[in-house]
Image (cartoon, coloured by chain):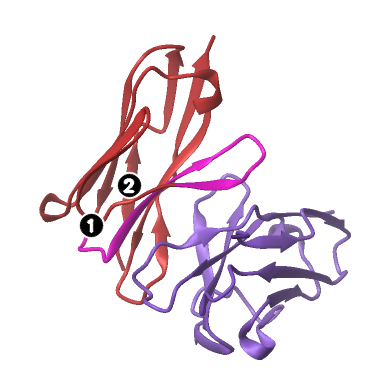
Chain colours: A red, B purple
């Protein structure tokens, strides 16, 4: 099955800084999703992005399917951005395979 | 439109007891998935329903776990008897009939087995 790797595992930012999170996947995926797990443990959908670029406010994501990676950009980070960011690729049987996450801490 | 809901939000039980988790998918979503994140590890797939049928249960860890989706609406996941290693967060997700579509996740049930 596909494997999903995320980097970096941990990231500490000062409020206002920008960051890039990376997700590599080992094989073709039908779908690629980014999630934010907030401090209460809830998984919030950020992007459904099998290819191309999407933007939503201070967040944007780019997936280059042919090169098997996706990037999540966070600009002008805020303390509320803290939490764990997961990417997940959908395999051929339509289940999501998650990476191990990037734990982000934004300091005021 | 209401999102995916899960009940209870938290459950603390003793080893050997039984716990039943419930998931209500988004109305009209035929696909329903269960995932879990045990302490410090990745979120992993458990099983997938299409309407009331189990499409894929390859992620179910053992026969102490039983999932049902009678009538193709809500689903339950029963753990009997619970073991310490079952502790974690259990997520439910749903998607529209086209299985390649976005999966929307519920808030999760935090299970602690003592």
Per the rendered image, the range of residues in magenta is A26-45
Q: Using the image, determine if residue A15 lies above or below residue B13.
A: above
The answer to which of marks 2 and 1 sits earlier in the sequence is: 2
Crowding near the residue tagged with mark 1, few <14, some 14–19, many ≥20 C-alpha atoms within 10 Å: some
Q: Whole-percent x and y of residue A93?
A: 35, 77
From the viewer's side, name the closer residue of A11 and A38: A38
Please state the chain letter of the residue tagged with numbered disc 2 in the rendered image.
A
Mark yes or no: residue A71 visible.
no
Q: Is mark 1 on a helix, strand or loop?
A: loop
Say which mark, if any, is on residue A26: 1
Q: Whole-percent x and y of residue A17?
A: 37, 13
Quadrant position of residue A3: bottom left
Mark yes or no: residue B64 visible.
yes
Residue at the image position 37 percent from the left and 67 percent from the top? B101
Q: Name the residue under label 2.
A: A5
Q: Using the image, determine if residue B80 lies above or below residue B92.
A: below
Q: Whole-percent x and y of residue A7?
A: 33, 35
Q: Is mark 2 on a helix, strand or loop?
A: strand
Crowding near the residue tagged with mark 2, few <14, some 14–19, many ≥20 C-alpha atoms within 10 Å: many
Quadrant position of residue A94: bottom left
Q: Whole-percent x and y of residue A41?
A: 63, 43
Residue at the image position 50 percent from the left and 59 percent from the top? B104
- Asked if residue A96 lies in the magenta stretch, the reply is no
Say whether residue B94 is left or right of residue B87. Answer: left
């Amino acid at each position: 099955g596909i494997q999903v790797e995320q980097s970096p595992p941990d990231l500490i930012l000062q409020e206002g800084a920008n960051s890039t999170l990376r997700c590599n996947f080992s094989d073709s995926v039908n779908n690629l999703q980014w999630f934010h797990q907030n401090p209460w443990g809830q998984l919030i959908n950020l992007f459904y992005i099998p290819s191309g670029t999407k933007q939503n406010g201070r967040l944007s994501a780019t997936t280059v399917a042919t090169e098997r990676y996706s990037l999540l950009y966070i600009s002008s980070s805020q303390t509320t951005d803290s939490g764990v960011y997961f990417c997940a690729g959908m395999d051929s049987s339509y289940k999501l395979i998650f990476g191990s996450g990037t734990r982000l801490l934004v300091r005021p | 439109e209401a999102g995916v809901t899960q009940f209870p939000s938290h459950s603390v039980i003793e080893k050997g007891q039984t716990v039943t988790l419930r998931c209500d998918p988004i109305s009209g979503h035929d696909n329903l998935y269960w995932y879990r994140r045990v302490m410090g590890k990745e979120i992993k797939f458990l099983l997938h329903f299409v309407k009331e049928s189990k499409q894929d249960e390859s992620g179910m860890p053992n026969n102490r776990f039983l999932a049902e989706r009678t009538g193709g609406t809500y689903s339950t996941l029963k753990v009997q008897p619970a073991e310490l290693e079952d502790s974690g967060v259990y997520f439910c997700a749903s998607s529209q009939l086209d299985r390649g579509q976005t999966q929307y996740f519920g808030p999760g049930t935090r299970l602690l087995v003592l």
